[in-house]
Each structure stands twice: as C-alpha cells, then as structure tokens.
Image (cartoon, grey):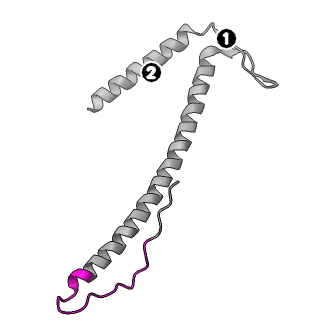
C-alpha cells in the first residue's frame, strides 16, 4: 500500500511542477483594498491561496476535534456514573430495599 501512496505523491508533484513551469510567463497583481501586491507569477498566488485555505481548514478542524473530545469526555463521565449505579443495583440483595445511590444527578444536555 505504501508504494501506491509514493507513486500518487510523485505524480502529484510532477503535475504541480508542470503547472508551474507552463505558467511562468503569466504574471498578475493582486489588489486588496488599498494594498497592491508586486507583480508575481500567477502560480505563486495560486499556491498562496491554497496554503491559506489549508491553514484555515486546519484551524476549523482543530476546533471541531477539541469540541468532539470535550463531548467524548462528558459522555465517558456519564458512562462511568451509570456503571457505578448499575454495580450498586447488581450487588444489592433481593430481600433488601434497593439502595439509593448517592451520586450526583446527570448534567442537563445543552444543544450547541
């Protein structure tokens, strides 16, 4: 499987280099509000835009991962609490009254 990954990576690099070499003569200037960039090859602007998009995607993904890890921790705590309660109920004798667990009530769920 690693050989396929290396071949695909090499083909991708060759395609990127071919694109850059074919578009060396194409230059462009970007103007944002009052700022104007120097005249540079077009492929550099495309690479910059791709890099900025990749950085933005990474930040959004990291935020989502932290959010999901928080939800996972909350679910694991709730699972642990419920297992303790279940163990108390399993270990209770049938003749005795069921023990009232002295555990904290579950946290109310909030939708985000």
Question: From the viewer's perspective, is residue 44 above or below residue 65?
Answer: above
Q: Which mark is residue 13?
A: 2
Q: Which mark is residue 89?
A: none
Q: Residue at x 22, y 87 (%)?
A: 92
Instruction: Please tell me whether mark 1 sits on a helix, a strand or a loop.
Output: strand
Q: Residue at x 31, y 78 (%)?
A: 85
Q: Residue at x 37, y 65 (%)?
A: 76
Q: Residue furthest left?
A: 94
* Picture coordinates of residue 24, whole percent (x, y): 60, 10
The residue indicated by pointer 1 is 27
Quarter of the figure with the N terminus: top left
Q: Residue at x 40, y 81 (%)?
A: 103
Q: Which residues are magenta?
A: 89-106
Instruction: Give the dominant element type of the magenta stretch: helix, strand or loop.
Output: loop
Instruction: Please tell me whether mark 2 sits on a helix, a strand or a loop.
Output: helix
Left/right of residue 91 with respect to residue 55 in the rendered view: left
Kindly indicate the quadrant of the structure image that contains residue 20. Answer: top right
Question: From the viewer's perspective, is residue 3 above or below residue 91?
Answer: above
* Picture coordinates of residue 93, whole percent (x, y): 19, 89
Query: Label 1 neighbourhood size at 10 Å, few (<14), some (14-19), many (20+)?
Result: some
Q: Is residue 83 a member of the stretch shown in magenta?
A: no
Q: Earlier in the sequence, mark 2 or mark 1?
A: 2
Q: Is residue 103 a member of the stretch shown in magenta?
A: yes
Left/right of residue 13 with respect to residue 97 in the rendered view: right
Left/right of residue 38 with respect to residue 46 in the rendered view: right
* Picture coordinates of residue 65, whole percent (x, y): 47, 50
């Amino acid at each position: 499987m690693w050989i396929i990954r290396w071949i695909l990576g090499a083909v991708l690099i060759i395609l990127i280099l071919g694109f850059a070499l074919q578009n060396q003569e194409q230059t462009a200037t970007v103007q944002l509000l009052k700022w104007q960039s120097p005249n540079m090859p077009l492929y550099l602007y495309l690479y910059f835009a791709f890099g900025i998009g990749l950085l933005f995607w990474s930040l959004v993904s990291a935020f989502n991962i932290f959010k999901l890890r928080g939800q996972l921790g909350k679910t694991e705590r709730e699972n642990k609490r419920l297992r303790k309660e279940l163990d108390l109920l399993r270990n209770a004798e049938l003749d005795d009254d069921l023990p009232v667990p002295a555990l904290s009530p579950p946290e109310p769920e909030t939708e985000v």
